Image (cartoon, rainbow, N blue to C red):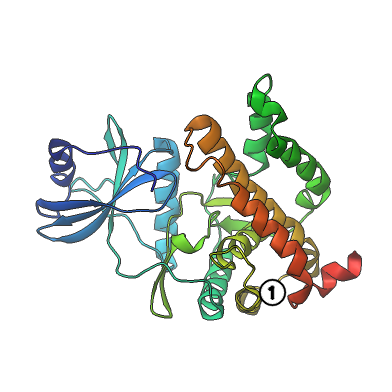
Amino acid sequence: MARYTTLSPTELARIVSQYPIGTPLKLEEIPGGFGNSNFKLTTTAGEFLLKICDEKDPAELNMQIDLLQHLHQYAYPTVYPIPTKDRKYLIHETFGSVMLYPFLQGEQPRSSPDTLAHLGEALAQLHCIPPIAKLPRFAMGISQMIPFFEEVQGTPFATHPFVESLKSQLAAMESQLNARLPMGLLHGDLFLDNTLFVGNQMVAILDFEEGCYDTLLIDVGMTLIGCCYTPEDRLNLGAAQRFLDAYNAVRPLTESEWQSLDCFVQYAALSIAFWRFRQFNIRRPDAHRADTYQEMITRSTQFKRHKSDIHGFQFYLAEE
């Protein structure tokens, strides 16, 4: 779990007092996630998700709130923050910013064809919603990688095999990444742990913290790399196919997108690998997570090996 911040009883009482949610009874850590400290808060009024935002600054969080309010107009299936008694969505404390959400019942699903069919439809619906103004570009991609290469110059990380591989792979993908492809509103981080299901029914797509405006194919690639694998990092072909079929039924991919899909699956995998490498080796060194970036490399290799088994890649394969 990403637990960077803890709360004293006094701090918790001060936070809860600002919301119309009664008095606190219990605070439990929630495992999972990399960029926030998450807690299940039980009060005399019910159960809530209390999130301490360890990685985002107030401007980024306000943009996230604007995006959620925009999605609310379209009744998009996500979880929306609870305002304070003063109708604010953020509480600024010395240890960071706090947001409060309803605690939705459900669980993280397994990768399965039925699960991915729901996610394919939901992602395509998101991509049909017009974006709001001033959304950032995809935060884990090239816009962060280029400064990172400069950041590690003169350090032992400059010649690390992953950093050198990242540079060479980006150079090889440059023309496709810069191609004119459909752009729009992205989730930016659609992994299974950012979804909530009850049985086979999807409840919500969670955590729009990386919501952005960029090439829609980034989200498609991210969902394939994040949601279509077994715990042993083997590609679940049935899940991948159902995801693409369900997505394509709502927002048909163009021929150019089919041709570029393999590239953007690789780009999504590299983006997550990059974030984990930088986070747990440089910014917040963590010996237990230092090698978690390798999971994405393994998944990307698996995808390349089996992409010809997925219907729809005939456009791409015809060009190879």
Q: Which residue is mark 1?
A: 252
Q: Quadrant of the C terminus?
A: bottom right
**Horizontal side, residue 34 vs residue 137: left or right:** left
**Could you say where residue 93 lies in the image, as x and y percent from the top left?**
26, 33
Residue 268 at least partly seen: no
Amino acid type of the residue that numbered disc 1 sits on in the rendered structure: Pro
Instruction: Please tell me in which quadrant of the rendered image residue 8 appears.
Output: top left
Circle 1 sits in a helix, a strand or a loop, which is it?
loop
**Could you say where residue 254 lies in the image, as x and y percent from the top left?**
76, 69
Residue farthest top in this picture: 154
**Could you say where residue 243 lies in the image, as x and y percent from the top left?**
61, 74
**Residue 34 sits above or below residue 278 on the image:** below
Residue 202 at least partly seen: yes
Please name the residue shown 44% across and 46% down the image. 34
Compare residues 317 and 250 and report the one nearer the observer. Answer: 317
Compare residues 297 and 118 and report the one nearer the observer. Answer: 297
Compare residues 64 and 282 and report the one nearer the observer. Answer: 282
Please name the residue shown 74% across and 69% down the image. 306
